[in-house]
Image (cartoon, rainbow, N blue to C red):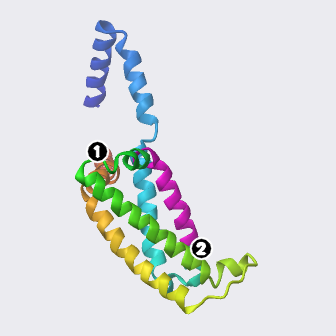
């Protein structure tokens, strides 16, 4: 109740002394309603991470889910690359010139991860037991494909760990902003309702 009174006084004051500010506030509110690219990126990264961990062990999910989840994972990686395309193109153009050390390390790590994931997905397709046969495509899985798939999957886990470590500050700050703060706000809102009731 007190908050509403303060807000009303604030709005009345600014409307009286600064009538144009109302438009600016409306514009800010409209901007706030749009989904943040950081939020979208965070959500896609989270989905990729969870899908990767789930797909990492076919014994946990079963071979069919492992294969279909891995195919979806490939689509999520493509989406992730498209979201970061400007950074990727800009860094590629200047990778051999003066570029920040962290950007160069990030670029090299991401390139290795992309190559490795391409190998994981390709070898996974070559040894598919469920997804491709369901589509009427039958390939002869060989020992070499299985070995390459296993080795590249292990390398992907290692590279993902490095990727997460390199972006840890961003992960923590974004989690606080888009997950923890909204959860706390919701909880505080419920507590306020209980207290006022």
Question: Which residue is drawn at the image coordinates 40% and 34% (left, top)?
Answer: 32
- How many numbered marks does the figure carry? 2
Identify the residue at the far front of this view.
Answer: 96
Q: Categorize mark 1 by other alpha carbons within 10 Å: few (<14), some (14-19), many (20+).
A: few
Query: The N terminus appears in which quarter of the rendering?
Result: top left
In the image, taking residue 87 as reference, residue 64 lies left or right, namely right
Q: Which residue is at the front of the view, 99 or 84?
A: 99
Q: Which residue is at the front of the view, 32 or 141?
A: 141
Q: Position of residue 51 (x, y in %)?
A: 47, 69
Give the magenta-colored segment's residue range: 70-87
The numbered mark, 2 or 1, whose residue comes first in the sequence reads: 2
Taking the magenta stretch, the answer to whether it contains residue 77 is yes
Q: Which mark is residue 68?
A: 2
Taking the magenta stretch, the answer to whether it contains residue 178 is no
Determine which quarter of the picture holds residue 9: top left
Q: Which residue is at the front of the view, 171 or 122?
A: 122
| 115 up-or-down from 5: above or below | below
Q: Nearer the viewer, mark 2 or mark 1?
A: 2
Q: Which residue is mark 1?
A: 192
| 115 up-or-down from 136: above or below | above
């Amino acid at each position: 109740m007190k908050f509403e009174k303060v807000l009303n006084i604030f709005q009345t004051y600014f409307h009286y002394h600064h009538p144009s500010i109302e438009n600016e506030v409306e514009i800010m509110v409209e901007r706030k309603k749009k989904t943040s690219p950081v939020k979208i990126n965070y959500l896609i990264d989270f989905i990729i991470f969870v899908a990767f961990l789930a797909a990492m062990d076919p014994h946990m999910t079963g071979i069919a889910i492992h294969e279909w989840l891995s195919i979806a994972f490939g689509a999520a990686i493509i989406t992730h690359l498209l979201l970061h395309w400007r950074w990727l193109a800009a860094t590629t153009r200047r990778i051999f010139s003066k570029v920040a050390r962290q950007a160069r390390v990030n670029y090299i790590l991401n390139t290795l991860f992309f190559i490795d994931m391409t190998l994981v997905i390709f070898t996974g397709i070559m040894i598919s037991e469920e997804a491709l046969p369901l589509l009427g495509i039958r390939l002869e899985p060989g020992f070499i494909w299985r070995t390459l798939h296993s080795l590249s999957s292990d390398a992907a886990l290692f590279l993902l760990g490095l990727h997460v470590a390199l972006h840890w500050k961003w992960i923590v700050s974004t989690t606080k902003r888009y997950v923890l703060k909204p959860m706390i706000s919701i909880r505080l809102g419920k507590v306020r309702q209980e207290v006022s009731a």
